[in-house]
Amino acid sequence: MAYVFSGVSVFGCLVTGFIFLIFITYRHTPIVKANNRNLSYVLLVFIILSFLSVFLFLGRPNDVTCRLRETSFGIFFSVAISSLLAKTVIVCVAFKSTKPGSPWRKWLSVKLPHTIVLLCSSLQVVLCVIWLSISPPFQDLDTQSYPDKIIIQCNEGSDICFYSMLGYMGLLAAVSFVLAFMVRTLPDSFNEAKYITFSMLLFCSVWISMIPAYLSTRGKYMVAVEIFAVIVSSAGLLACVFFPKCFIILFKSEMNKNTDLLRKRKE
Protein backbone atom coordinates (compact mmCIF):
# COMPACT_ATOMS: atom_id res chain seq x y z
CA MET A 1 0.00 0.00 0.00
CA ALA A 2 2.85 2.39 0.84
CA TYR A 3 4.56 1.67 -2.48
CA VAL A 4 1.35 2.40 -4.41
CA PHE A 5 0.72 5.68 -2.61
CA SER A 6 4.37 6.70 -2.98
CA GLY A 7 4.32 5.98 -6.71
CA VAL A 8 1.10 7.90 -7.25
CA SER A 9 2.44 10.84 -5.24
CA VAL A 10 5.69 10.97 -7.21
CA PHE A 11 3.80 10.70 -10.48
CA GLY A 12 1.53 13.57 -9.42
CA CYS A 13 4.56 15.71 -8.56
CA LEU A 14 6.15 14.98 -11.96
CA VAL A 15 2.96 15.84 -13.86
CA THR A 16 2.54 19.04 -11.86
CA GLY A 17 6.17 19.95 -12.45
CA PHE A 18 5.74 19.35 -16.18
CA ILE A 19 2.70 21.65 -16.23
CA PHE A 20 4.67 24.24 -14.27
CA LEU A 21 7.39 24.05 -16.93
CA ILE A 22 4.80 24.54 -19.69
CA PHE A 23 3.39 27.60 -17.94
CA ILE A 24 6.84 29.12 -17.48
CA THR A 25 7.77 28.43 -21.11
CA TYR A 26 4.54 30.00 -22.40
CA ARG A 27 4.29 32.64 -19.69
CA HIS A 28 3.85 35.49 -22.19
CA THR A 29 0.89 33.93 -24.00
CA PRO A 30 -2.65 35.23 -23.32
CA ILE A 31 -4.03 32.04 -21.78
CA VAL A 32 -1.24 31.88 -19.19
CA LYS A 33 -1.48 35.55 -18.33
CA ALA A 34 -5.25 35.30 -17.91
CA ASN A 35 -6.48 35.52 -14.31
CA ASN A 36 -3.02 36.34 -12.97
CA ARG A 37 -0.25 33.90 -13.86
CA ASN A 38 1.41 34.42 -10.46
CA LEU A 39 -1.63 32.83 -8.82
CA SER A 40 -1.23 29.88 -11.18
CA TYR A 41 2.39 29.52 -10.09
CA VAL A 42 1.38 29.61 -6.41
CA LEU A 43 -1.34 27.04 -7.03
CA LEU A 44 1.04 24.68 -8.84
CA VAL A 45 3.66 24.94 -6.09
CA PHE A 46 1.18 24.07 -3.38
CA ILE A 47 -0.30 21.22 -5.40
CA ILE A 48 3.23 19.78 -5.52
CA LEU A 49 3.55 20.26 -1.75
CA SER A 50 0.19 18.54 -1.25
CA PHE A 51 1.39 15.52 -3.21
CA LEU A 52 4.62 15.48 -1.20
CA SER A 53 2.73 15.66 2.11
CA VAL A 54 1.62 12.07 1.43
CA PHE A 55 5.07 10.88 2.57
CA LEU A 56 4.39 12.27 6.06
CA PHE A 57 1.60 9.70 6.39
CA LEU A 58 3.78 6.72 5.50
CA GLY A 59 5.89 4.74 7.94
CA ARG A 60 5.93 4.53 11.72
CA PRO A 61 4.39 7.71 13.20
CA ASN A 62 6.04 9.77 15.92
CA ASP A 63 5.18 13.06 17.61
CA VAL A 64 6.92 15.17 14.95
CA THR A 65 5.38 13.48 11.91
CA CYS A 66 1.96 13.44 13.59
CA ARG A 67 2.08 17.20 14.06
CA LEU A 68 3.34 17.82 10.55
CA ARG A 69 0.97 15.49 8.75
CA GLU A 70 -2.19 16.83 10.38
CA THR A 71 -1.38 20.49 9.80
CA SER A 72 0.55 20.46 6.52
CA PHE A 73 -2.22 19.35 4.18
CA GLY A 74 -4.62 21.80 5.81
CA ILE A 75 -2.28 24.73 5.19
CA PHE A 76 -1.29 23.59 1.69
CA PHE A 77 -4.87 23.15 0.55
CA SER A 78 -5.94 26.42 2.16
CA VAL A 79 -3.33 28.33 0.14
CA ALA A 80 -4.36 26.48 -3.03
CA ILE A 81 -8.06 27.17 -2.52
CA SER A 82 -7.32 30.78 -1.60
CA SER A 83 -5.55 31.12 -4.96
CA LEU A 84 -8.63 29.81 -6.75
CA LEU A 85 -10.82 32.15 -4.73
CA ALA A 86 -8.60 35.08 -5.74
CA LYS A 87 -8.83 34.01 -9.41
CA THR A 88 -12.62 33.98 -9.19
CA VAL A 89 -12.74 37.36 -7.48
CA ILE A 90 -10.57 38.81 -10.27
CA VAL A 91 -13.07 37.60 -12.88
CA CYS A 92 -15.97 39.15 -10.98
CA VAL A 93 -14.22 42.47 -10.33
CA ALA A 94 -12.90 42.70 -13.90
CA PHE A 95 -16.39 42.25 -15.32
CA LYS A 96 -18.00 44.79 -12.98
CA SER A 97 -15.26 47.36 -13.64
CA THR A 98 -16.04 47.44 -17.38
CA LYS A 99 -19.11 49.59 -16.76
CA PRO A 100 -18.54 53.38 -17.09
CA GLY A 101 -17.89 55.06 -13.76
CA SER A 102 -17.79 51.76 -11.93
CA PRO A 103 -16.40 51.98 -8.37
CA TRP A 104 -14.92 48.51 -8.85
CA ARG A 105 -12.04 49.93 -10.92
CA LYS A 106 -10.12 50.87 -7.80
CA TRP A 107 -10.03 47.20 -6.79
CA LEU A 108 -8.27 46.17 -10.00
CA SER A 109 -4.71 46.04 -8.74
CA VAL A 110 -1.95 43.53 -8.23
CA LYS A 111 -2.40 43.74 -4.47
CA LEU A 112 -5.99 42.42 -4.44
CA PRO A 113 -5.31 38.73 -5.31
CA HIS A 114 -2.19 38.66 -3.14
CA THR A 115 -4.15 40.10 -0.22
CA ILE A 116 -6.89 37.49 -0.60
CA VAL A 117 -4.41 34.61 -0.65
CA LEU A 118 -2.41 35.97 2.27
CA LEU A 119 -5.43 36.74 4.43
CA CYS A 120 -7.32 33.49 3.84
CA SER A 121 -4.28 31.24 4.26
CA SER A 122 -3.07 33.17 7.32
CA LEU A 123 -6.27 32.33 9.18
CA GLN A 124 -5.61 28.63 8.63
CA VAL A 125 -2.02 29.05 9.83
CA VAL A 126 -3.31 30.76 12.98
CA LEU A 127 -5.74 27.89 13.61
CA CYS A 128 -2.92 25.36 13.25
CA VAL A 129 -0.60 27.34 15.56
CA ILE A 130 -3.34 27.48 18.21
CA TRP A 131 -3.87 23.73 17.76
CA LEU A 132 -0.17 22.97 18.19
CA SER A 133 0.02 25.26 21.21
CA ILE A 134 -3.03 23.94 23.08
CA SER A 135 -3.22 20.23 22.34
CA PRO A 136 -0.98 19.05 19.47
CA PRO A 137 -1.24 15.66 17.75
CA PHE A 138 0.92 12.92 19.26
CA GLN A 139 1.86 9.28 18.86
CA ASP A 140 -0.73 7.02 20.46
CA LEU A 141 -0.87 3.30 21.20
CA ASP A 142 -4.27 1.79 20.46
CA THR A 143 -4.78 -1.41 22.44
CA GLN A 144 -8.59 -1.43 22.28
CA SER A 145 -9.46 -1.91 18.61
CA TYR A 146 -7.88 -5.36 18.24
CA PRO A 147 -7.32 -7.70 21.23
CA ASP A 148 -4.03 -9.18 19.98
CA LYS A 149 -2.52 -6.07 18.37
CA ILE A 150 -1.11 -2.72 19.40
CA ILE A 151 -1.71 -0.09 16.74
CA ILE A 152 0.75 2.81 16.66
CA GLN A 153 -1.18 5.77 15.33
CA CYS A 154 -1.53 9.53 15.49
CA ASN A 155 -3.94 11.01 17.98
CA GLU A 156 -5.31 14.38 16.86
CA GLY A 157 -4.97 15.79 20.37
CA SER A 158 -7.81 18.27 20.22
CA ASP A 159 -10.72 17.06 18.12
CA ILE A 160 -12.16 20.57 18.13
CA CYS A 161 -9.00 22.03 16.56
CA PHE A 162 -8.76 19.19 14.05
CA TYR A 163 -12.31 19.64 12.81
CA SER A 164 -11.97 23.42 12.93
CA MET A 165 -9.03 23.10 10.55
CA LEU A 166 -11.05 20.84 8.24
CA GLY A 167 -14.10 23.07 8.61
CA TYR A 168 -12.21 26.21 7.62
CA MET A 169 -10.76 24.42 4.60
CA GLY A 170 -14.27 23.34 3.68
CA LEU A 171 -15.57 26.89 4.16
CA LEU A 172 -12.98 28.26 1.74
CA ALA A 173 -13.88 25.58 -0.79
CA ALA A 174 -17.62 26.28 -0.40
CA VAL A 175 -17.17 30.04 -0.86
CA SER A 176 -14.96 29.45 -3.91
CA PHE A 177 -17.52 27.04 -5.35
CA VAL A 178 -20.49 29.38 -4.86
CA LEU A 179 -18.67 32.43 -6.24
CA ALA A 180 -17.25 30.52 -9.22
CA PHE A 181 -20.68 29.06 -9.98
CA MET A 182 -22.20 32.56 -9.96
CA VAL A 183 -19.66 34.05 -12.37
CA ARG A 184 -19.10 31.01 -14.61
CA THR A 185 -21.28 32.43 -17.42
CA LEU A 186 -19.87 35.95 -17.51
CA PRO A 187 -18.99 36.94 -21.12
CA ASP A 188 -15.25 37.01 -20.61
CA SER A 189 -12.85 35.02 -22.77
CA PHE A 190 -10.47 34.84 -19.81
CA ASN A 191 -13.13 33.37 -17.53
CA GLU A 192 -11.97 30.08 -16.01
CA ALA A 193 -14.64 30.07 -13.29
CA LYS A 194 -16.39 27.02 -14.75
CA TYR A 195 -13.21 24.96 -14.29
CA ILE A 196 -12.87 26.24 -10.73
CA THR A 197 -16.51 25.25 -10.14
CA PHE A 198 -15.77 21.67 -11.17
CA SER A 199 -12.59 21.52 -9.09
CA MET A 200 -14.33 22.81 -5.95
CA LEU A 201 -17.27 20.44 -6.47
CA LEU A 202 -14.84 17.52 -6.63
CA PHE A 203 -12.86 18.84 -3.66
CA CYS A 204 -15.93 19.24 -1.44
CA SER A 205 -17.28 15.83 -2.46
CA VAL A 206 -14.01 14.10 -1.57
CA TRP A 207 -13.66 15.66 1.88
CA ILE A 208 -17.35 15.29 2.78
CA SER A 209 -17.18 11.58 1.99
CA MET A 210 -13.79 11.30 3.70
CA ILE A 211 -15.03 12.25 7.18
CA PRO A 212 -17.42 9.29 7.79
CA ALA A 213 -14.93 6.90 6.18
CA TYR A 214 -12.17 8.29 8.42
CA LEU A 215 -14.25 7.90 11.58
CA SER A 216 -15.28 4.33 10.76
CA THR A 217 -11.78 2.90 10.17
CA ARG A 218 -8.77 2.12 12.33
CA GLY A 219 -5.04 1.62 11.88
CA LYS A 220 -3.50 1.73 8.43
CA TYR A 221 -6.90 2.01 6.77
CA MET A 222 -7.56 5.29 8.56
CA VAL A 223 -4.27 6.61 7.21
CA ALA A 224 -5.13 5.26 3.75
CA VAL A 225 -8.39 7.24 3.76
CA GLU A 226 -6.51 10.47 4.52
CA ILE A 227 -3.89 9.78 1.85
CA PHE A 228 -6.58 8.97 -0.70
CA ALA A 229 -8.38 12.24 0.06
CA VAL A 230 -5.16 14.24 -0.28
CA ILE A 231 -4.17 12.60 -3.58
CA VAL A 232 -7.61 12.82 -5.19
CA SER A 233 -8.05 16.44 -4.09
CA SER A 234 -4.65 17.43 -5.48
CA ALA A 235 -5.24 15.57 -8.73
CA GLY A 236 -8.70 17.12 -9.05
CA LEU A 237 -7.36 20.66 -8.68
CA LEU A 238 -4.63 19.93 -11.20
CA ALA A 239 -6.89 18.30 -13.78
CA CYS A 240 -9.85 20.66 -13.62
CA VAL A 241 -7.88 23.92 -13.59
CA PHE A 242 -4.76 23.23 -15.68
CA PHE A 243 -5.44 20.38 -18.12
CA PRO A 244 -7.78 22.45 -20.35
CA LYS A 245 -5.21 25.24 -20.57
CA CYS A 246 -2.36 22.84 -21.31
CA PHE A 247 -4.44 21.21 -24.06
CA ILE A 248 -4.94 24.60 -25.73
CA ILE A 249 -1.27 25.55 -25.32
CA LEU A 250 0.08 22.29 -26.75
CA PHE A 251 -2.55 21.25 -29.31
CA LYS A 252 -4.69 24.31 -30.07
CA SER A 253 -2.10 27.06 -30.33
CA GLU A 254 -4.28 29.01 -32.76
CA MET A 255 -6.69 29.65 -29.86
CA ASN A 256 -3.90 31.05 -27.69
CA LYS A 257 -3.77 34.42 -29.42
CA ASN A 258 -4.96 37.89 -28.49
CA THR A 259 -6.98 38.23 -31.69
CA ASP A 260 -8.86 35.01 -31.04
CA LEU A 261 -9.53 35.91 -27.43
CA LEU A 262 -10.80 39.37 -28.36
CA ARG A 263 -13.07 37.89 -31.02
CA LYS A 264 -14.59 35.51 -28.45
CA ARG A 265 -15.10 38.36 -26.01
CA LYS A 266 -17.06 40.35 -28.63
CA GLU A 267 -19.22 37.32 -29.37
Image: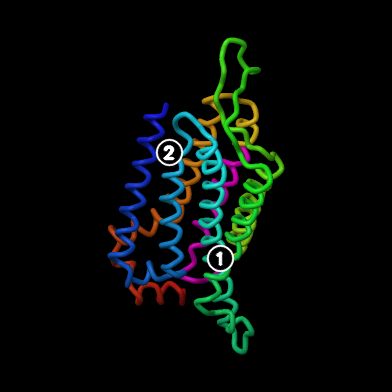
Tag 2 secondary structure: helix
Seen from the viewer's position, the closer of residues 100 and 234 is: 234
Q: CA distance from mark 2 to mark 1?
A: 26 Å
Q: Which label belongs to residue 55?
A: 2
| Percent of width and height locating residue 218 | 59, 24
- In the displayed structure, 84 sits above or below 136; it is below
Neighbours of disc 1 within 10 Å: few (<14), some (14-19), many (20+): some
Magenta region, main secondary structure? helix
Dot 1 amino acid type: Leu
Residue at figure coordinates x 61%, y 14% from the top left:
146
Q: Is residue 177 visible?
A: no
Magenta-highlighted residues: 184-209
- Say which quadrant the N terminus sits in: top left
Asked whether, in this view, residue 92 is left or right of residue 9, the answer is right
Seen from the viewer's position, the closer of residues 140 and 23 is: 140
Neighbours of disc 2 within 10 Å: few (<14), some (14-19), many (20+): some
The quadrant holding residue 37 is bottom left
Extreme residue toward the right, this view:
160
In the rendered image, which residue does mark 1 sit on?
118
Dot placed on the residue nearer the N-terminal end, 2 or 1: 2
Seen from the viewer's position, the closer of residues 260 and 4 is: 4
Seen from the viewer's position, the closer of residues 54 and 56 is: 56
| Percent of width and height locating residue 186 | 55, 69
- In the displayed structure, 134 sits above or below 25; it is above
| Percent of width and height locating residue 220 | 52, 25
- In the displayed structure, 198 sits above or below 5; it is below
Q: Is residue 155 visible?
A: yes
